[in-house]
Amino acid sequence: MRLAKTSFELTVLHMADAPVKNCSLDDLQYEITEGDCLGMLKLVGTETVPPEKARDAMLELGNDGSFFEDRGDDDEDSDDDTVAPVDAGGQSRANPGGYPSTGYAKVEWSVGDITCLVNVSDEKAAAWLDRNHKHIQERMAEAGWEAIHTLIAMDNPAREPVAAGWP
C-alpha cells in the first residue's frame, strides 16, 4: 500500500466578536462561501507515508488504522462498501453508497417562531434572527452531537467502538 499525506493551510478572516470555533469542513466551507467569513486554502505540501507509518498516520486522523485495508496498489477503483469513520466535527472520510453527506435532521427557524414568543414586528424578528443565527446554529449543533452520542451509546450498550471517534 502506497500512501501520501497532503497538508493544507486554511486561513479564515472573520469579525473579532464572532470567533471561528472547532467545526467541520462543511461548516467552514459554508462560512467562507456563503457566511460571514473570508478564507483562503493554500497547499502546504505532499509527502510519502512509509508503509510502516501508515497505521500511525491513520490513527492521527482519528481512524482506527484500518481505512486502507484490503486496498492494494492497483486497487484504486475498489468497490469498498465499508463505512468510514466520521470525525468529531462530523466530516465523513468517505461517502460509500452515495448516501447524502448532509441533509439529515435539518431544522429551520422563521420570523413566526420569534413573533409568537415576543411582541415584535416581523422586521425586528428578522433582524434578531440575522444577528443571532450563528449562535442558534452552534447551540443546535452541540445538542445534535450530544443526541447522536447518546443514541449510539444506547444502540451499543457494550460500548464496543464502532469506529474511531465514536463513543
Image (cartoon, rainbow, N blue to C red):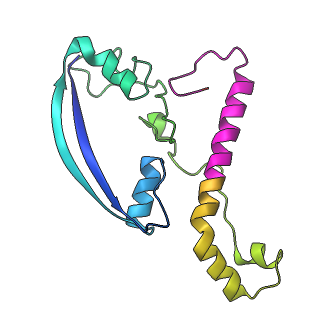
Give the x, y percent position of residue 128. 65, 77
Q: Point out residue 136 in the picture as x, y percentages from the top left corner.
A: 64, 61
Q: Is 123 situated left or right of 120 in this image?
A: left
Residue 71 can be seen, yes or no: no
Question: Which quarter of the picture shows residue 57?
Answer: top left
Q: Is residue 109 above or below residue 121?
A: above
Residue 28 in view: yes
Where residue 143 appears, x then y in whole percent? 68, 47
State the quadrant of the N terminus.
Answer: top left
Towards the viewer: 143 or 92: 143
In the depicted view, which residue is nearer to us: 50 or 10? 10
Residue numbers of the magenta segment: 140-166
Q: Name the residue at the front extreme.
A: 16
Is 112 in the magenta? no
At x 46%, y 41%, the residue is 91
Q: Is residue 93 left or right of residue 111?
A: left
